[in-house]
Image (cartoon, rainbow, N blue to C red):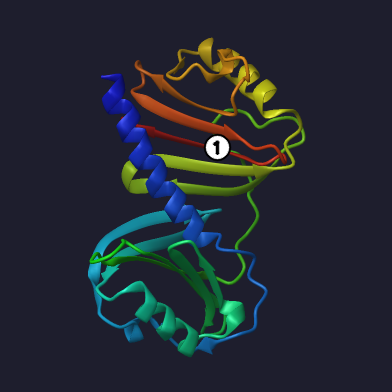
Amino acid sequence: MKTKIVLLIFFSCLTFSLCGEVFTLWPWKGGGTTSRGSLSDRIPELGPVLHTERMRVNGIDLELTVSAIHTDFATLAEFLLRTFQSENLRFGNGSVKVTYRVGENSVERWLMVDGGPGKAVTFFKIKAPEHIPAVVEWPVELPELPPGAIPEQIIYFPDRKAVYGSFRNGGGEPASLLRNVSDRLSLTGWTPLGREAETISGGSGEIFIRPDERRILWINYGENGVGAAYSRPY
């Protein structure tokens, strides 16, 4: 049973992390390539939309689409370099991120992930307002924020009844924060699967389950005051 739950939360975390990465590619500073409409129809050998994910980011309703690009990554990179200016692109190890202005007040964000030799490139796309409002309230579904922490991004996934939150400026060492939150959660019916807080190093993240509510919870704290949490039913 626990193995199935671990696999479920692994794939759930993969989904929301990709969603979050598409949306927060890097701070949008303007400039570079602009267009009246989406340029995605110019992508060579772009297939139809395979999956659509509804998202509500800091109170704004958005939609993530996932497609396959049936061309090799090198050819795709050449297309991007011809189409966009350098400030619109960020290349990584087997991936590339694109951000550009569409119309007057919108920004389109892409994430393209290489599937490897002989496999398609996975294409994530979101169109969003250029300016997203700040977080108003931290979700009650997630553990309380560390002292001094400032909420940065809240993403609700209505179709899966899931919520993701990230923060910055959180005070305290990751191991200490994890021990504190693990103790509090244990008092309210949550069970840690990895028991990272009990290790010698203390750990920085953990997966919890709550059988009575059939929910899973993932928490992670970073060294520089950032952190994130994600919860959904199972």
Nearer to us in this view, 7 or 74: 74
Rendering coords of residue 149 (x, y %)? 72, 38
Q: Height in image: 110 above or below 2?
A: below
Q: Is 174 left or right of 112, judged from the image as shown?
A: right
Rendering coords of residue 206 (x, y %)? 50, 26
Can residue 141 be seen? no
Q: How many marks?
A: 1
Q: Residue at x 42, y 48 (%)?
A: 16
Which amino acid does the dot numbered 1 rest on?
Pro
**Is disc 1 placed on a helix, strand or loop?**
loop
Q: Is 33 left or right of 78, judged from the image as shown?
A: right
In the picture of the structure, the residue carrying the numbered disc 1 is 139
Q: Residue furthest front?
A: 117
Q: Residue furthest top?
A: 187
Nearer to us in this view, 111 or 91: 91
Q: Residue at x 30, y 60 (%)?
A: 52
* Quadrant placement of the N terminus: top left
Q: Residue at x 34, y 64 (%)?
A: 65
Q: Height in image: 105 above or below 210?
A: below
Nearer to us in this view, 209 or 212: 209
Q: Residue at x 72, y 36 (%)?
A: 170
Can residue 204 be seen? yes
* Quadrant placement of the C terminus: top left
Rendering coords of residue 64 (x, y %)? 38, 62
Q: Quadrant of residue 46?
A: bottom left
Q: Residues within 10 Å of mark 1 (few under 14, many from 20)?
A: some
Q: Quadrant of residue 210?
A: top left
Rendering coords of residue 217 (x, y %)? 45, 29
